[in-house]
Amino acid sequence: MCLGIPMQVVEADGNVAVCRGRQGEQRIDATLVAPVEPGEWLMTFLGHARQRLPADEAARIDRALDALDAIQRGESNLDAYFQDLVDREPQLPEHLRTRP
């Protein structure tokens, strides 16, 4: 399985960026999203950046990945990882809502 990992750009040099994420620093091929600047967040897959991310979305994705780690450790209460969803009614995507 391939998971996208949010990473923050630390240094950028042309199409290559040094990024920091869950597993430390890595050199990332940023060809598809170049140019990038330090401080930006990127969604990365197997050493390649696929898109830019707002910081809040990167944080939500990181919390979801933390939840996967927690599940693998046998935890069952995952509310702490999804505070943005707790006590909120589920919402259908706009395209699935009834139209007048």
Image: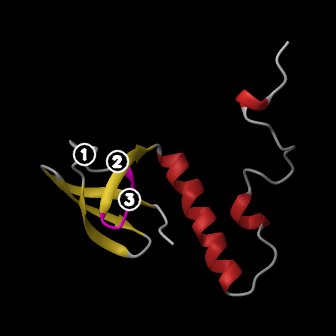
Report the residue at 76% width, 70% height from top.
78
Question: Could you tell me residue 47's position as x and y percent?
Answer: 30, 66
Q: Nearer the viewer, mark 3 or mark 1?
A: 3
Report the residue at 73% width, 35% height from top.
93
Q: Please identify the quarter of the rendering in which residue 95 is found.
A: top right
SS at circle 3: strand
Query: Would residue 63 appear left or right of 22 to someone viewing this image?
Result: right
Q: Are marks 3 and 2 in contact (CB under 8 Å)?
A: no
What amino acid is labelled 1 in the image? Glu
- For disc 3, the marked residue is 44
26 vs 39, nearest the viewer: 26
Q: CA distance from mark 2 to mark 1?
A: 6 Å
What amino acid is labelled 3 in the image? Thr
Q: Please identify the quarter of the rendering in which residue 63 is found.
A: bottom right
SS at circle 2: loop
Query: Would residue 53 appear left or right of 63 to someone viewing this image?
Result: left
Question: Could you tell me residue 45's position as x and y percent?
Answer: 39, 62
Q: CA distance from mark 3 to mark 2?
A: 12 Å
Q: Main secondary structure of the magenta part?
A: strand
What amino acid is labelled 2 in the image? Glu
Q: Which residues are magenta?
A: 40-47
Q: CA distance from mark 3 to mark 1?
A: 15 Å
Task: State the residue lying farthest toward the top.
Answer: 100
- For disc 2, the marked residue is 40
- For disc 1, the marked residue is 37
Numbered marks: total: 3
Question: Could you tell me residue 99's position as x and y percent?
Answer: 82, 17
Magenta-colored stretch includes residue 99: no
Q: Are marks 3 and 1 in contact (CB under 8 Å)?
A: no
